Amino acid sequence: MARGLIGTINDEIASGGTVTGDLTVEGDLTIQGSSTSSNYDEVIDGHVQVTSTNKLKFGGDTSTDSDSYILESSADVLDVYVGAVKLLSMTEAGGGASDKVSIPALTPLYLDGGGNSYIAETAGDTVKIVTGGSNSLTVTASTTTVLGDLVISGDDLFMATNTSGAALIGDGTNFNPVVIGGDISIGTTGTAAIGSGVILDADVNASAAIAISKTALVAGTNISLSTNTLNVDDAFLINSGNDATTGVITSAGYKLNVTNNSGDVAIEFQQGGTTTYTMGIDDAVSSGTADLFKIHSDTALADASDFIMDKSGNVTIGGDLTVSGDDLYMGTNTSGYVLVADGTNFNPVAISGDVTLASNGAVTIASTAVENGMLAGSIADTKLNQITTANKVDIGALDIDGATDIGEALIDADLIIVDNGAGGTERSSAMSRVKTYVADVTLTTGTQAALTTLAGVTTIGASTPTTTNVAGILTVGASGSGQNVTFYGGDASAIGLVWDEDGGTASNGALTLGANTHGIDFTVYGDGSGNKMVWDSSDNSLTVTGTLQTADLVLNNDRGHYLIVEEEDYLSIKNEKTGKLYKFVLEEIDGN
């Protein structure tokens, strides 16, 4: 052993020689090649050979043995120890897969100089790849787990099962290769094919608007296609045969035809394969009437079908007829007619004789149609109309003695019966007439002219033919004690003029001409000839002949409300509804 040697071992010192035992160098040891070699940059030009099972140690000092070394532990097996721990083992076994480099179990192999990225066996047969301190990949004997995203740079993914057309489909736990089946299939090129006969009506979107050109529909006899329009003309449906009826069904003139011109032409209506109604033409019946159109609630037409119509339009209904509407239209619909049976059928006839019937259902008993024999008994007095025909009540039939006394004094309003002029015409008369007649206080033309006051008189000229003429001034009431005055027109329901002595504002009285819906016409004359103001109630107009003079003018109806004011130099108009004020623009003209 050489100790304290600091220097260089080169080919000049030990050319081809052998250093036996351990070589300990305190300081740097440089092994270099020949000075004549061109490889000056090599640390070792040649080789250092250590006998098998001997160690090439690193570190330590002259008194302490080193625990970091390289050792050929067996033939062609080189181990590297650091700190007495074997961290690397290299085996040469003939090349290929037999050669190997191994590190101890659970020892990480750092790829970034001892940072946080490494490969390690974390447990038995479990290898983990850590990148940046985070586990990225874990590999066991049966599974490989990628903890992040898996990016395949190539275009192929090889599975244990690579069946043509299979797709990776998740089952809630993992994805498995499954062949697409059912209504569609997918080829290896990704082409999807919808199976034949699998599309149902519910599968088609309501707005699909499938073009006719995309269907198998083609033009045929009397059928043409124009873009998405199907045009049908004449025959379009052929019945190749029916168990009950032979022939064809065509749309030529919309006809249902039997080719041999005989036999019934019928259509059966079914539910669940069971015929419930039959409609068609019965070519012969037992009654002898042929070609009847029928509807019957059975599997075939019958002589007495539920509905029968002949060629004349006559209809026979086997059951009841219910009219849901309010009208029944007949060939004759004369106002007031009713349907009356004659033993064979009902016919529209007019009600005549003792009564008539109006279209609104009102029944009128004809005049003089009720005879004494038609009365079931006495008719109550309240049911009798007033007897207006002369000589129908005998004076002896009046029971005056048996009547109840009036029990009070007679007044002007009480009525009596008089024979007018003894001519056989009875009239009623107020007791006031008796008083006038007996007292001889009838107002003559002369006496009326001298009257200044009609004390107690409430009505003047109320009864035809009385006429009261008043010459001069007629005063009704007195100052501070007014009286109401009413002037009636010729119509019994009309009032001409009414003075209401306290009906005005602050009891100032009110004068009313006419009444609601009973207008009157009046004329107010001026001093000048032809000057007048006329009110015509029939067309609600006031006509002024002459000059109409007023202060401000108010126009007011259900649509607008305006006030026209005469200013000093112009006219203004104000909209009373909006408060807006306007000015009339006037142009001066020659007044001559």
Image (cartoon, rainbow, N blue to C red):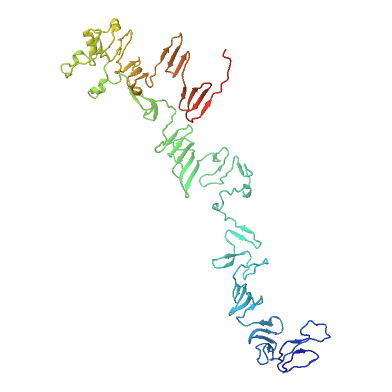
Instruction: Name the spot of residue 507 as percent of width and height, x first.
Output: 33, 22
Q: Residue at x 30, y 16 (%)?
A: 479
Q: Residue at x 57, y 60 (%)?
A: 182
Q: Where on the picture, by quarter, is residue 101?
A: bottom right
- Rendered-image quadrant of the N terminus: bottom right
Q: Is residue 339 above or below residue 590?
A: below
Look at the image and tell me in which quarter the C terminus lies. Answer: top right
The residue at the point 43 percent across, 27 percent down is 333
Q: Looking at this rendering, what residue extends furthest in the front direction?
A: 568
68 vs 389: above or below = below
Q: Say whether residue 355 is visible.
A: no
**Which one is in front, 546 or 586?**
586
The answer to whether residue 457 is left or right of residue 66 is left
Picture layout, residue 139 above or below residue 289: below
The reply to whether residue 275 is visible in this rendering is yes
Q: Position of residue 51 (x, y in %)?
A: 72, 92
The residue lying furthest to the top in this view is 446
Q: Is 205 situated left or right of 508 in this image?
A: right
- Say left or right for 489 vs 269: left
**Along the line of sight, which residue is nearer the eye, 243 or 562?**
562
Q: Position of residue 398 (x, y in %)?
A: 19, 15
